[in-house]
Amino acid sequence: MHLLNTLKKSASLLAIAALATSISGCSLFGDDDEEIKIAPLQPINENLNVSVKWERSVGDGVGEFFSRLNPVVAYDKVYAADRQGTVVAMSKDNGETLWEVELHDLIEINEASDEGWFSGILSSPFPARISGGLVAAYDKLFLGTENGDLIALNAETGELVWHVDVGNEVNSDPAVGEGRVVIHTTGGKVISYDAESGEQQWQFEYQTPTLTLRGSSAPTIASGGVIVGDSNGTASILIANNGQQAWTQSVGTPSGATELEALADIDANPVVVGGVIYMIAYNGELVALELRSGEVRWKRDYSAFENMLVRGGRIYLTDYQSHLYGLNQEGGIELWSNNEMFGRKLTGPAWHDGFVVVGDLDGYLHWLNPTDGTIEGRYEVGGDGIFAQPVVDGTTLYTQTRDGDIVAIEINSGS
């Protein structure tokens, strides 16, 4: 998995690439003795039993590539895709395939132009390299690609509704709401499109640092604004109607003697609850911000790039070392921590039938007691590991593995 994001200066690419290090499973700094080891799984007291409702394979998965590709549940269907461009709609009841499309059959992509070596990367032909989404809304399915595509499919049939070339890699979920689709590209662009037609409405751009983490935070649409966390560690709200910046606030402050030590990206998605935005940065802090003004309510020292879970007055998060925390939502006071699975590349947490659940690099799901962080249950789905935050609909959890398996899991009643 590469750490480097798109670099503007090709001459510096090779030099900086030599510094790139996996951000999950080993330390960014120090010698080999300081590397984060992968914790072996210890026996637990099983207090719940789970069973597989159904399992299906979708294409070839994402392999070892960085990806934020996730399944989504909507319209009584589960939608999933692989990196190459296979998109499938399945019955959420039994996993039966309802439709399946190949993006390269729907969209004609031009060969690389002669405008320079970098333009060839941005306009490369398929495979699609799907990396952003999936998001379902307005009877459509929205997704983004590393090739710089934003695509809308008919959610009922899989037919192409519209497709635009955004000119930058899209590897986070599009934000969909208030009649628009907003994307945040790795090149520092935030672009709004009409959800019905795909027509561009506005574009906001910020200066990105030379070296960033691999990935970008998904925007969030709320109360007439677009909330964005950028690769400089800054939170902003853009006015949804015109893209003008309403306010900015520092979440992660770049510091350190080297570019690696100064990484302060916001890669986790913003979470809005009531009038408060919760955001977290890598090498930064967890902050609660006023939605209207950006004023800091409180901040705490945590570093993370996985999505958080905010529920029932608590914040649950996975930090960059795969330590898990439960915090009080009002003041960010730590209620519990679980360090038993450090280095296991844990996903962001999800809520499943009264438990906090995460996936790991070996394809295990772990259910934790939300009160004290004790591991209450564990199940191995395999599939070369789980890379995306699990998705829950009702009492059913859906998880996607690196080799393309979609597994629907339920907690057995009476367990």
Image: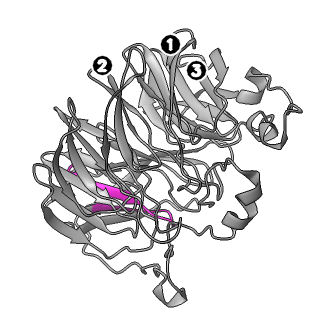
Q: Are marks 1 and 2 in contact (CB under 8 Å)?
A: no
Q: Amino acid at mark 2?
A: Gly
Which residue carries the number 3 mark? Answer: 152
Q: Nearer the viewer, mark 2 or mark 3?
A: 2
Q: Horizontally, is 81 left or right of 101 in the view?
A: left
Label of residue 194 in the image = 1
Q: Position of residue 172 (x, y in %)?
A: 51, 40
Q: Nearer the viewer, mark 1 or mark 2?
A: 2
Mark 3 and mark 1: Cα distance apart in space: 11 Å
Which residue carries the number 2 mark? Answer: 224
For the point 30% across and 60% down, the residue is 367
Q: Position of residue 55 (x, y in %)?
A: 52, 46
Q: Position of residue 191 (x, y in %)?
A: 52, 25
Q: Give the class, few, some or many, for how many residues have Cα within 10 Å of label 3's Cα (few <14, many ≥20).
A: many
Label 2 sits on a secondary structure element that is loop
Q: Are marks 2 and 3 in contact (CB under 8 Å)?
A: no
**Mark nearer the N terminus (2 vs 3):** 3
Q: Nearer the viewer, residue 78 or 68?
A: 68
Q: Nearer the viewer, mark 3 or mark 1?
A: 1
